[in-house]
């Protein structure tokens, strides 16, 4: 019975429309962030757990990393690709967690999604409505259809796409010290963030 239920859940996730998926994830994250007292207090472990369980299962980190690495991705060994993807993923954990920790009374609005029945790549547009009349924050998601349902592979905040933002710093570091050098820089940044010695992860690998 349990295996049947798991199979039904997987099937449902695979057929969920991309905008419906983002709406569901967003609502679950915002509701949890507002209801969890520990998250409100800034409990990093609770915030990381929320991000890991609710957001990241729906992100294609390998594609995101390959796009950020650009032409250098083809030069990387399988081991380097695996390690680079891991370090980039860990960096994004801190980035997303920092955003989740700031959830208060915001709400999300979504633009109607227009897509053909056979579409395999779409952009879901939304915006965060701030309380007390603050300026809305435009938030968009690039998504691809996979055998396991729709996956996010790029995010835009206020018109700046994450992959494009990192692409320049990745290329700069790789040209200076190779792919292993970039992996080392990301690993060091992640150690700093894990120990609380760094502020916001920002948008660079430095």
Image: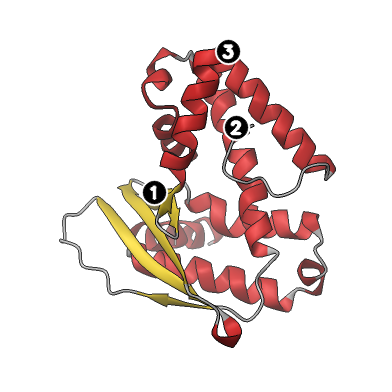
Label 2 neighbour load within 10 Å: few <14, some 14-19, many 20+: some
Q: Residue at x 36, y 52 (%)?
A: 142
Is residue 32 shown above or below 144?
below
Residue 9 can be seen, yes or no: yes
Which of these two is toward me, 58 or 205?
Answer: 205
Q: Position of residue 119 (x, y in %)?
A: 20, 54
Residue 65 can be seen, yes or no: no
Cα separation, mark 1 vs mark 3, equals 36 Å
Disc 2 and disc 1 in contact, CB within 8 angstroms = no
Q: Indicate which disc residue 86 carries.
A: 2
Cα separation, mark 2 vs mark 3, equals 19 Å
Q: Position of residue 192 (x, y in %)?
A: 78, 37
Q: Indicate which disc residue 177 carries.
A: 3
Q: Residue at x 50, y 23 (%)?
A: 172
Q: Which residue is mark 1?
A: 148
Q: Position of residue 205 (x, y in %)?
A: 60, 33
Instruction: Work out which residue is located at the far bottom of the displayed protein and give it.
Output: 132
Residue 113 as seen in the image, left or right of residue 64 = left
């Amino acid at each position: 019975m349990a295996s049947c239920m798991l199979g039904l859940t997987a099937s449902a996730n695979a057929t969920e429309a991309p905008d419906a998926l983002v709406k569901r994830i967003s609502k679950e994250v915002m509701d949890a962030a507002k209801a969890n007292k520990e998250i409100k207090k800034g409990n990093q472990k609770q915030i990381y757990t929320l991000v890991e369980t609710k957001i990241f299962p729906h992100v294609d980190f390998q594609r995101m990393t390959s796009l950020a690495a650009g032409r250098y991705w083809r030069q990387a060994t399988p081991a380097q690709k695996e390690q680079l993807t891991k370090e980039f993923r860990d960096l994004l954990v801190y980035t997303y967690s920092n955003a989740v920790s700031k959830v208060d009374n915001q709400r999300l609005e979504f633009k109607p999604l227009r897509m053909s029945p056979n579409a395999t790549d779409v952009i879901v547009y939304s915006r965060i409505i701030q309380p007390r009349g603050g300026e809305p924050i435009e938030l968009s998601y690039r998504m691809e259809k996979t055998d396991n349902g729709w996956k996010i592979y790029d995010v835009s905040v206020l018109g700046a796409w994450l992959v494009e933002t990192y692409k320049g710093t990745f290329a700069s570091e790789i040209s200076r010290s190779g792919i292993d050098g970039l992996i080392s820089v990301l690993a060091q940044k992640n150690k700093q963030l894990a120990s609380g010695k760094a502020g916001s992860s920002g948008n660079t690998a430095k």
